[in-house]
Amino acid sequence: MTVFVNELGPRDAPSVVLLHGLSTSGWMWREQAAALVGDLHVLIPDLPGHGLSNDHPWISLSDTVRVVADVIASRTPSGRAHVVGLSLGGYVAALLAADAPEVVDSAIVSGVNVLPFPNPAVMRLAGRVMGPFATSGPVLRANARTLRVRDEDFQAYRASAKAMAKGTIGRVTGDVMAFRVPAAAGTSPCRLLAVAGGDENELILRSLPRLAAGFAAGSARIASGMGHAWNGEEPGLFTAMIRAHVADSPLPEGLSAVE
């Protein structure tokens, strides 16, 4: 499967892949891309069922991992990349780091839950019922408030949500609810940073140490005062985190260790 990929920056520089969240697309990384493009090779795919890849249906997390691994193998000079994922992109990045470490130099995963959801049957039903209404104006605005989408970004968020292929939300919801620390994580050599905004859902915050401990080279941090989509809330800090992790240097101030 071939998906749309926005490729930026010098090809002889270290490669970084930025993976977006559910109901959005590669546009959400525009501030990180603008800051990194001078000295990093940046690849921003639209995941299956989203954006300009909406003609390729979302099949499963495992299938999407294969898609992203193919992008890295075919679009980077070394066949490897540093991978950054937020929300849905974080789940893809975590599974990629575990199952395809041959293409991953390091991974940052933000906003990922690995604990059982309460009342999963009810949540799955709600996902199926709400799916057809997810792109309606009131629901989009409510979601945007929850995600702390800035006013100036709402139209891009709305356009991305409306571009999603039918059925994507329901299939993704099922995959995410079943997600746990990948079985192969313990044998993966990838450096993995699990991070979340300090104002995140409790399950995501409680997942941080478990996900980090699942990888031999895992660590966890919290961005105090931030919400789920904090790459837009505090783009400078998020970008500095990417640079530091790519260089394997100390992480910036503003990220607290998880106790």
Image (cartoon, helix red, strand yellow):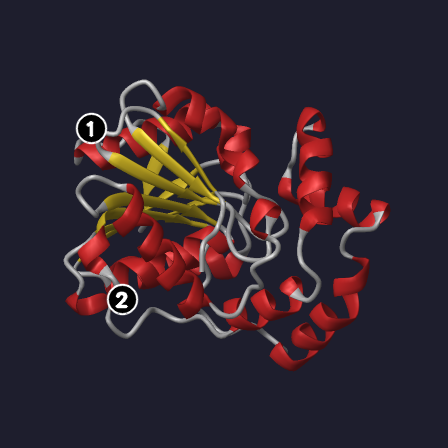
Compared to 113, does 105 lie above or below? above
Q: What is the distance, in whole Å, between disc 2 and disc 1 at their CAs? A: 26 Å
Q: Does residue 198 lie above or below 69 as drawn?
A: above
Type of amino acid under label 1: Asp
Q: Is residue 225 visible?
A: no
For the point 43% across and 60% down, the residue is 206
Q: Amino acid at mark 2?
A: Asp
Across and down, in percent, residue 148 comes to: 64, 37
Label 1 crowd (10 A; few <14 / some 14-19 / many >=20)? few
Query: Secondary structure beneath disc 1?
Result: loop
Give the residue number, with chain letter if any, for mark 2: 99
Give the SS element for disc 2.
helix
Measured as percent of width and height from the top left, residue 176 is found at 51, 67
Residue at the image point whose x is 59% and y is 74% from the top: 118
Query: In this rendering, is residue 14 above or below 236?
Result: below
Name the residue that disc number 1 marks: 12
Please name the residue shown 38% across and 38% down the image. 43
- Residue in front for this viewpoint, 197 or 26: 26
Residue 246 in which image quadrant: top left
Q: Residue at x 40, y 27 (%)?
A: 237
Residue 132 left/right relative to 235: right
Q: Which mark is residue 79?
A: none
Residue 151: x %, y % from top left: 72, 27
254 relative position to 143: left or right: left
Residue at the limit of the structure toward the top, as seen here: 38
Most foreground residue, 68 or 89:
68
Q: Of discs 2 and 1, which sits in the foreground?
A: 1
Sequence-earlier tag: 2 or 1: 1
